[in-house]
Amino acid sequence: MLHDQTNAAEAQCPDFLCPECSSSLIQAVEWTQLSEKLWSVVMRCPECFRSGEIIMNADQVHEFSLLSEEATRNLLEVAESLDREIFRESCETLEKLLQANLVWPSDLL
């Protein structure tokens, strides 16, 4: 759970949801190791823009790191898919324009 800076000591068992809007998209913006087993993590919600600090143990940091890596992979896959789709549509549009003699190859230079 994302807590305000003033309530950082209360955040001992984060569930990685924004307390303001319940978004699961919270992002770590700053990591500080407090001890061998504890981390202070400043989190930000990209949906409601709330930010705050939470305290995580090593297991929670590892879990959050894995979730973040998975989310990053998913975003990259979606971005690549969208990029391919946009390119395919652009090629189809250009092909139609060329076939209809609405554009010449020299227009593309």
Image: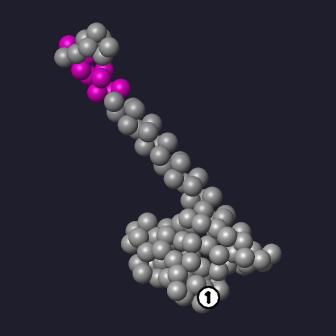
Q: Is residue 60 visible?
A: no
Q: Quadrant of the N terminus?
A: bottom right
Q: Position of residue 74 (x, y in %)?
A: 55, 54
Residue 58 covered by magenta stretch: no
**Residue farthest top in this picture:** 106
Specify the amino acid type for callout 1: Ala
Question: Is residue 25 placed above or below 19 in the rendered structure?
Answer: above
Looking at the image, residue 100 sits to the left or right of residue 78; the answer is left
* Along the line of sight, the residue nearer the viewer: 11 or 15: 11
Tell me where residue 100 sits by quadrant.
top left
Q: Quadrant of residue 55?
A: bottom right
Q: Position of residue 104 (x, y in %)?
A: 25, 11
> Would residue 47 be visible to someone looking at this image?
yes
Q: Which residue is mark 1?
A: 9
In the picture provided, is 62 more to the left or to the right than 18? right
Which residue is the extreme one toward the bottom?
10
Between residues 55 and 66, which one lies in front from this camera angle? 55
Q: Residue at x 67, y 70 (%)?
A: 32
Judged from this view, the residue extending furthest toward the right is 36
**Part of the protein shown in magenta:** 91-101
Q: Residues within 10 Å of mark 1 (few under 14, many from 20)?
A: few
In this view, the residue in front, 28 or 96, is 28
Residue drawn at (40%, 32%), measured in percent from left and top?
87
Q: Quadrant of the C terminus?
A: top left
In the image, residue 70 sits, relative to residue 101, either above or below, namely below
Q: Secondary structure at mark 1?
A: helix
**At 69% from the left edge and 75% from the top edge, which residue is drawn?**
39
The picture places residue 29, in percent across and down from the top left corner, at 56, 65
Q: Magenta part mainly helix, strand or loop? A: helix
Where does residue 41 sit, x and y in percent of width and height? 61, 73
